Image (tube, rainbow, N blue to C red):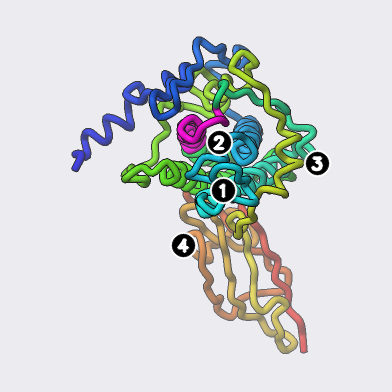
């Protein structure tokens, strides 16, 4: 087993990884029939110092998902589909030859629809447009021969999926970092932002859930090729990525070859999306549920007799906080509870009509500051 100090060295030194050598010059070797991209340009407009912003991360991910959709569609309709390991000679994705492998075709059919679904979510969250016609790239370029043979196709699949896995791992870190920098008082924003700390935390979770599916694609591709150990990694890697959008060690830089006409033949995103329903297979599931900060009381209003005070149970949930305080009548008012970020507690008989409770982030600076208010709740009494 690799010792912990060696694992930490690999994590701390992205130069040990060969990601950019592989992406700047995709030499897939014998496994891919010798496909090579030489000296392709990177996106010069990127800043090398600017911190990635939420919609930059979402936009880069959208481009990656559009690229992946185009890739899987053309694998299903290109010459590679007639490999004996897929539909067999003369077969198609929807009508394989009896000698083919329908199960392996289904891996690719499901992957196509999964990438399209991811793109739809990212497009909506970033408010990039009503449909794919407004996406920034409508054409992608692949080396000649990518869709001709199984070894070429799966070799490219491995390069792309490893890039996507690295990008989403990096996005998890970046969204979490942006959430930590965002004031707890920033409310949930609309699609397109500005986003609250809770929303940014949620985007980190969504990135992780998409990354898990991309890792499945990598393994299933290796399985199609007949690798003895398809699931061959202890941990997924960022492979040298330091950012998603900005800088030379970014996911956008890694995507550049596939946006560059000198790479090889052009393939249309619109064509892929138009034909996807005829060759794709649906999957199940939804994005992780979003749980914004909340503060509720039960009962509310509180039934009481004339002249009495009330008792109620206060319930809170603050996903963006590590610990919380609930204070009464103001952010710095009397302390009701100092607690973990999710739970409930019943008051004693002291709640008055119109009393307001303040849910405060106690893990970020002064817990009594108005800037650290996550939610408020006003409780009323109802005389019976």
Residue at image coords 73%, 69%: 354
The secondary element bearing badge 4 is classed as: strand
Mark 1 vs mark 3: which is more N-terminal? 3
Which sits earlier in the primary sequence, circle 4 or circle 2? Answer: 2
Around disc 1, counting alpha carbons within 10 Å, would you say few (fewer than 14), some (14 to 19), or many (20 or more)?
A: many
User: Which label sits in the foreground, 3 or 4?
Assistant: 3
**Quarter of the figure with the N terminus:** top left
* Of 328 and 99, the residue lying toward us: 99
Q: Point out the tag, 1 or 4, that comes first from the N-terminus.
A: 1
Question: How many marks on residues?
Answer: 4
In the rendering, which numbered label is found on residue 13?
none
Figure check: 283 above or below 197 = below
Within 10 Å of disc 2 (Cα), the crowding (few <14, some 14-19, many 20+) is many
CA separation in Å, label 1 and label 3: 20 Å
Question: Looking at the rendering, which quadrant does residue 10 occupy?
Answer: top left
The disc label shown at residue 339, or none: 4
Q: Residue 29: percent from the left, percent from the top?
A: 39, 23
Q: Which residues are magenta?
A: 146-166
Q: Which mark is residue 80?
A: 2
Could you tell me how far apart the alpha carbons at marks 3 and 2 are, in whole angstroms? Answer: 33 Å
């Amino acid at each position: 087993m690799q010792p912990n100090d060696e694992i930490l060295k690999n994590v701390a030194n992205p130069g040990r990884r060969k990601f950019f050598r592989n992406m700047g010059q995709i030499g897939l070797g014998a496994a891919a029939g010798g496909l090579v991209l030489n000296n392709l340009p990177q996106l010069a407009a990127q800043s090398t110092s600017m911190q990635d912003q939420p919609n930059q991360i979402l936009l880069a991910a959208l481009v990656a998902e559009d690229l992946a959709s185009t890739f899987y569609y053309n694998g299903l309709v290109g010459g590679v589909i007639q490999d004996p390991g897929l539909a067999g000679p003369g077969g198609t994705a929807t009508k394989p030859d009896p000698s083919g492998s329908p199960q392996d075709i289904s891996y690719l059919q499901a992957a196509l629809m999964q990438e399209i679904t991811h793109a739809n979510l990212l497009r909506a969250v970033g408010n990039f447009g009503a449909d794919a016609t407004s996406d920034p790239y409508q054409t992608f370029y692949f080396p000649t021969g990518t869709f001709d043979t199984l070894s070429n196709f799966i070799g490219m699949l491995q390069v792309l999926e490893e890039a996507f896995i690295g990008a989403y791992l990096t996005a998890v870190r970046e969204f979490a970092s942006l959430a930590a920098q965002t004031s707890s008082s920033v409310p949930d924003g609309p699609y397109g932002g500005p986003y609250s700390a809770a929303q940014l935390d949620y985007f980190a979770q969504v990135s992780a859930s998409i990354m898990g599916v991309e890792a499945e694609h990598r393994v299933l591709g290796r399985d199609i090729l007949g690798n003895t150990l398809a699931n061959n990694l202890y941990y997924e890697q960022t492979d040298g990525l330091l950012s998603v959008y900005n800088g030379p060690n970014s996911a956008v830089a890694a995507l550049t070859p596939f946006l560059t006409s000198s790479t090889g033949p052009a393939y249309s995103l619109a064509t892929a999306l138009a034909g996807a329903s005829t060759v794709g297979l649906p999957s199940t599931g939804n994005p992780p549920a979003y749980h914004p900060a909340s503060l509720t009381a039960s009962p509310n209003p509180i039934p009481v007799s004339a002249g009495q005070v009330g008792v109620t149970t206060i319930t809170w949930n603050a996903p963006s906080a590590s610990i919380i305080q609930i204070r009464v009548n103001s952010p710095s008012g009397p302390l009701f509870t100092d607690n973990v970020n999710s739970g409930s507690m019943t008051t004693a008989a002291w709640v008055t009509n119109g009393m307001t409770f303040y849910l405060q982030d106690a893990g970020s600076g002064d817990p009594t500051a108005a800037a650290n208010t996550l939610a408020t709740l006003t409780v009323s009494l109802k005389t019976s």
